[in-house]
Amino acid sequence: MKKLLIAMLVASALSACGRQEKLTLEQALLEKLQADSDLKDYKIDPKDMTGCVIEEISKSLPVMPMDNQRGLYFEAYAKFVTATDPTKAIQDAVPLFGSVKDARVAALSITDHIMYCMERLVDQRQPAEEERPAPAAPQPPAKPAN
């Protein structure tokens, strides 16, 4: 019984790794995306877009979901999103990503994720071609009443 309890505590502790940092990134992205005119033009909900971008960033992280370094990556991405000086944010992330090049790639990937998610969300909104109703058959012209 003790082993089961310990295993459950360890699992819950590991699943909490990076949760606060992920929420910080989510909030920063949401604030940025709420002001995005493209989302307004395409009528995309910023919350849906934020969820999609967070999902794509999570998939691209070089660590496993239970890794305690995951929070550091979310923190770095949050700094990329909110940075007034992108060069400094990239320099600060170099120790985490391993090189300036990799940190730049990570920072620029946010734009790629946004573009991918925009396309995905627009496509989800439009019914598939085969689901669209067939155009109505043309009606013969009405005969004039005599």
Image (cartoon, rainbow, N blue to C red):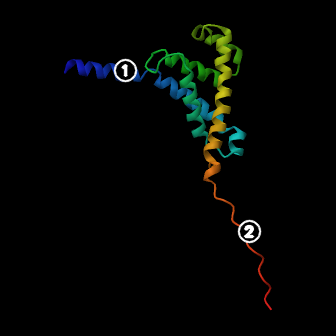
Secondary structure at numbered mark 2: loop
Answer with left or right where residue 111 lies relative to residue 5.
right
Percent x, y of residue 76: 59, 18
Q: Nearer the viewer, residue 111 or 128?
A: 128
Residue identifier under label 2: 138
Residue identifier under label 1: 13
The quarter holding residue 2 reads top left
Q: Nearer the viewer, residue 30 or 119?
A: 119
Q: Amino acid at mark 2?
A: Pro
Name which residue lies at 78% across and 83% down: 143
Percent x, y of residue 57: 57, 25
54, above or below 121, in the image: above
The quarter holding residue 59 reads top right
- Which quarter of the rendering shows the N terminus? top left
Q: Are marks 1 and 2 in contact (CB under 8 Å)?
A: no
Name which residue lies at 45% across and 15% down: 68
Q: Nearer the viewer, residue 95 or 137?
A: 137
Percent x, y of residue 67: 45, 16
Binning the other alpha carbons within 10 Å of mark 2 as few (below 14), some (14 to 19) or many (20 upward) gives few
- Taking the view exactly as shown, the residue that stands out farthest to the bottom is 146
Judged by depth in the image, the label closer to the viewer, 1 or 2, is: 2
Secondary structure at numbered mark 1: helix
52, above or below 45, in the image: above
Check residue 137 in the rendering and tell me which mark sits there, or answer none: none
Percent x, y of residue 78: 59, 23
Binning the other alpha carbons within 10 Å of mark 1 as few (below 14), some (14 to 19) or many (20 upward) gives few
Name which residue lies at 63% across and 11% down: 92
Answer with left or right where residue 40 lies relative to residue 62.
right
105, above or below 48, in the image: above
Q: Amino acid at mark 1?
A: Ala
Name which residue lies at 60% across and 44% down: 124
